[in-house]
C-alpha cells in the first residue's frame, strides 16, 4: 500500500536486509529503468552529486527534514541553543541505517548542514545524507567514509536563508517526492527514491537487469553489435546469456 500518515509507522525502518544487500549492488540507472517500467518517472533526485563518488552504494530508508525560507526575526544565531531545534533534533534522532534527506528548496546559497553535523550522523550509524542544497565544510565531508550528496558547496550557515520546520514528513528533494520510509539508493551518479511498498520487487528486478547488462557489456566490448543483443530479440543471444549466467554464477 502506498504511503499515508496511517502507514508511515508500518514502513518506518522495515527495509529487509536481503533487499538492502541487493540494492547495494545495482546502479541508480538500472533502478530508474525498473521504476519507469512501473510508470514512475520522477524518482531520481535532480542536480545532486556525491562528494566522494568512490564510496560504495548508499542504501537506507528516508528520514526527512524540511526547510522553508528563513524569516529574520525567527532565525538568529541563538536558535541553535534550543535542544529541540528541528535540525539538531533530526540529526540526533535519524535512525541508524536510515538516509537523512533534506528539502532545501533546491537553494544552495546557504548550507543545509556542515561537517560537524554530517560527522555526527556518520558516528550514529546513519547510512548517508542527501540535500538538494549545499554543504559547508564540503572538502572535509568528502574525506569521510560516509555517503553525502549535495548540489554544490555552500559556506553560509543554513539559518541565513533556511528555517528548519518539519521532521520526517513527505518532502520534495531535487524535484523527487520523498516519503518517510521510502528506500533511498545513491551511487557515483546520484540518488534515486524507491517507494517503500515496491522496494523488494524493484530490487529483485534490478538485480536481474544488472546481470543481463553485465553480459551485454562484456559482449559489446568483445566487438558484438547491439542489434538483436540489446534488447535480446535474437534467440541465440538469449541462449548465450543463459550459458553466461550459469558459467558466472549469476
Image (tube, helix red, strand yellow):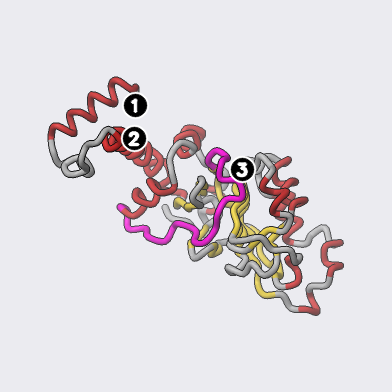
Figure check: 213 above or below 42: above
Q: Residue at x 69, y 54 (%)?
A: 138
Q: Dividing the picture into quarters, in which one does residue 75 lie?
A: bottom right
Q: Which residue is mark 1?
A: 250
Q: Which residue is mark 2?
A: 214
Mark 2 or mark 1: whose residue is earlier in sequence: 2
Magenta stretch contains residue 39: yes
Of marks 3 and 2, the one in the foreground: 2
Q: Dividing the picture into quarters, in which one does residue 108 lie?
A: bottom right
Q: Residue at x 75, y 46 (%)?
A: 120
How many marks can you see?
3
The residue nearer to you, when weighing 186 against 169, is: 186
User: Of helix, strand and loop, which mostly describes the magenta segment?
Assistant: loop
Q: Are marks 2 and 1 in contact (CB under 8 Å)?
A: yes
Q: Which residue is mark 3?
A: 127
Magenta stretch contains residue 58: no
Q: Element under label 1?
A: loop
Of marks 1 and 3, the one in the foreground: 1
Mark 3 or mark 2: whose residue is earlier in sequence: 3
Of marks 2 and 1, the one in the foreground: 2
Label 1 to label 3: alpha-carbon separation: 27 Å
Residue range corresponding to the magenta coloring: 37-57
Amino acid at each position: 500500500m502506498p504511503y499515508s500518515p496511517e502507514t508511515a509507522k508500518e514502513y518506518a525502518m522495515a527495509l529487509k536486509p536481503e533487499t538492502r544487500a541487493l540494492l547495494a549492488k545495482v546502479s541508480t540507472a538500472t533502478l530508474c529503468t525498473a521504476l519507469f517500467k512501473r510508470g514512475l518517472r520522477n524518482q531520481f533526485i535532480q542536480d545532486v552529486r556525491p562528494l566522494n563518488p568512490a564510496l560504495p552504494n548508499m542504501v537506507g530508508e528516508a528520514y526527512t527534514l524540511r526547510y522553508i525560507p528563513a524569516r529574520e526575526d525567527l532565525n538568529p544565531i541563538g536558535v541553535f541553543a534550543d535542544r529541540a531545534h528541528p535540525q539538531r533534533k533530526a540529526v540526533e534522532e535519524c535512525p541508524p541505517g536510515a538516509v537523512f534527506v533534506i528539502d532545501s528548496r533546491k537553494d544552495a546559497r546557504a548550507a543545509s548542514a556542515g561537517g560537524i553535523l554530517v560527522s555526527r550522523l556518520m558516528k550514529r550509524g546513519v547510512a548517508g545524507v542527501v540535500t538538494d542544497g549545499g554543504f559547508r565544510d564540503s572538502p572535509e565531508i568528502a574525506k569521510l567514509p560516509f555517503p553525502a550528496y549535495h548540489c554544490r558547496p555552500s559556506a553560509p550557515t543554513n539559518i541565513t536563508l533556511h528555517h528548519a520546520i518539519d521532521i520526517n514528513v513527505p518532502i520534495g528533494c531535487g524535484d523527487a517526492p520523498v516519503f518517510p520510509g521510502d528506500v533511498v539508493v545513491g551511487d557515483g551518479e546520484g540518488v534515486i527514491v524507491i517507494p517503500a511498498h515496491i522496494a523488494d520487487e524493484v530490487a529483485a528486478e534490478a538485480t536481474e537487469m544488472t546481470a543481463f547488462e553485465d553480459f551485454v557489456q562484456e559482449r559489446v566490448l568483445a566487438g558484438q553489435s547491439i542489434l538483436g543483443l540489446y534488447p535480446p530479440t535474437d534467440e541465440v543471444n538469449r541462449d548465450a546469456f543463459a550459458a553466461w549466467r550459469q558459467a558466472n554464477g549469476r
